[in-house]
Image (cartoon, helix red, strand yellow):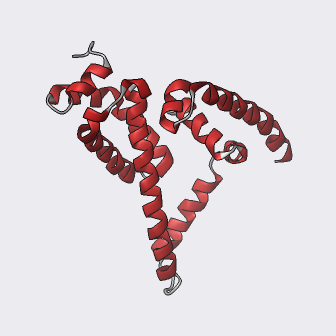
C-alpha cells in the first residue's frame, strides 16, 4: 500500500483497515504537529488528533477530491476540532477564573505561573511579528510554513481560493520581513 495514492486510501478507509493504517502513518505526525502548535499541550493535542482520525473514518464517504487533496481535507478536520477545543477551553478558563478568584494560591500555582511566564518570554521577536499579522494571514502562514501544506492545500483548509491564499501568504511574508528589523531595533 505504500505506493497507493491518498485518494484511493480515503475511498477504502471505511472498509479496509490497512487503508486507514497507511493514511494514518502518512499524515499523523503533521496533524499532531499542527494540533500541538495550536493547542500548546501535547496531551490535549493527542486527544484532538485521535478525534481527527475518528472523524476521518466517519466522514470518508463524503470526501470530495474536487475540493482539495486528502491532506488538506484531513487538516480541515483538524482545524475544526482545534477550534472546537479552543472554544471549550475558553469556557473552562472562564469557569476556572471564577473559582481561582475565591481561593489562595498554593505553591504548585506559583510554579505553574513561573512556567507560563517563561513560555511567554520564548521567541519574543517572532511572536511580536506574528501578532502584527491579520488572523487569516497568520493561520495561512502557519499552515504553509509550519505544517508543510502547499498554499493550495492551505486554501482548501481555510475555504478560500488558491490565488487568494498565495496573495495572503506573500503579504504575510512581506509583513514579517518588514516587522522583524523594526522589532529588533527597538529591543
Relative to 99, does residue 60 appear above or below in the rendering?
above
Give x and y (percent) for residue 160: 56, 34
Number of callouts: 0
Residue plotted at (63% across, 46% down): 135
Answer with left or right where residue 43 lies relative to residue 182.
Answer: left
Relative to 75, does residue 100 appear above or below in the rendering?
below
Answer with left or right where residue 164 lies relative to residue 52.
Answer: right
Residue plotted at (46% across, 76% down): 95
| Quarter placement of the N terminus | top left
Give x and y (percent) for residue 174: 75, 30
Residue plotted at (41% across, 24% down): 66
Answer with left or right where residue 131 lies relative to residue 101.
Answer: right
Give x and y (percent) for residue 93: 48, 69
Q: Nearer the viewer, residue 119 or 55?
A: 55
Relative to 134, does residue 151 appear above or below in the rendering?
above
Residue plotted at (62% across, 55% down): 120
Q: In this orientation, does residue 22 appear?
A: no
Give x and y (percent) for residue 114: 56, 64
Q: In this orientation, does residue 132 appear?
A: yes
Answer with left or right where residue 171 lies relative to residue 23.
Answer: right
- In the rendered image, the residue lying farthest to the top is 3
- The answer to which image quadrant residue 142 occupies is top right
Amino acid at each position: 500500500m505504500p505506493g497507493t495514492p491518498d485518494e484511493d486510501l480515503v475511498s477504502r478507509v471505511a472498509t479496509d483497515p490497512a487503508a486507514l493504517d497507511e493514511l494514518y502513518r502518512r499524515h499523523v505526525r503533521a496533524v499532531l504537529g499542527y494540533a500541538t502548535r495550536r493547542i500548546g499541550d501535547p496531551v490535549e493535542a493527542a486527544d484532538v488528533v485521535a478525534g481527527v482520525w475518528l472523524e476521518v473514518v466517519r466522514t470518508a464517504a463524503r470526501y470530495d477530491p474536487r475540493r482539495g487533496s486528502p491532506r488538506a481535507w484531513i487538516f480541515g478536520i483538524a482545524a475544526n476540532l482545534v477550534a472546537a477545543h479552543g472554544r471549550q477551553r475558553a469556557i473552562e478558563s472562564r469557569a476556572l477564573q471564577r473559582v481561582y478568584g475565591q481561593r489562595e494560591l498554593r505553591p504548585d500555582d506559583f510554579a505553574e505561573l513561573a512556567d507560563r511566564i517563561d513560555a511567554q518570554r520564548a521567541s519574543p521577536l517572532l511572536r511580536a511579528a506574528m501578532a502584527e499579522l491579520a488572523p487569516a494571514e497568520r493561520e495561512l502562514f502557519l499552515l504553509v510554513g509550519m505544517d508543510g501544506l502547499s498554499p493550495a492545500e492551505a486554501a482548501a483548509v481555510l475555504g478560500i481560493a488558491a490565488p487568494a491564499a498565495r496573495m495572503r501568504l506573500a503579504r504575510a511574508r512581506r509583513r514579517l520581513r518588514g516587522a522583524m528589523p523594526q522589532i529588533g531595533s527597538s529591543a
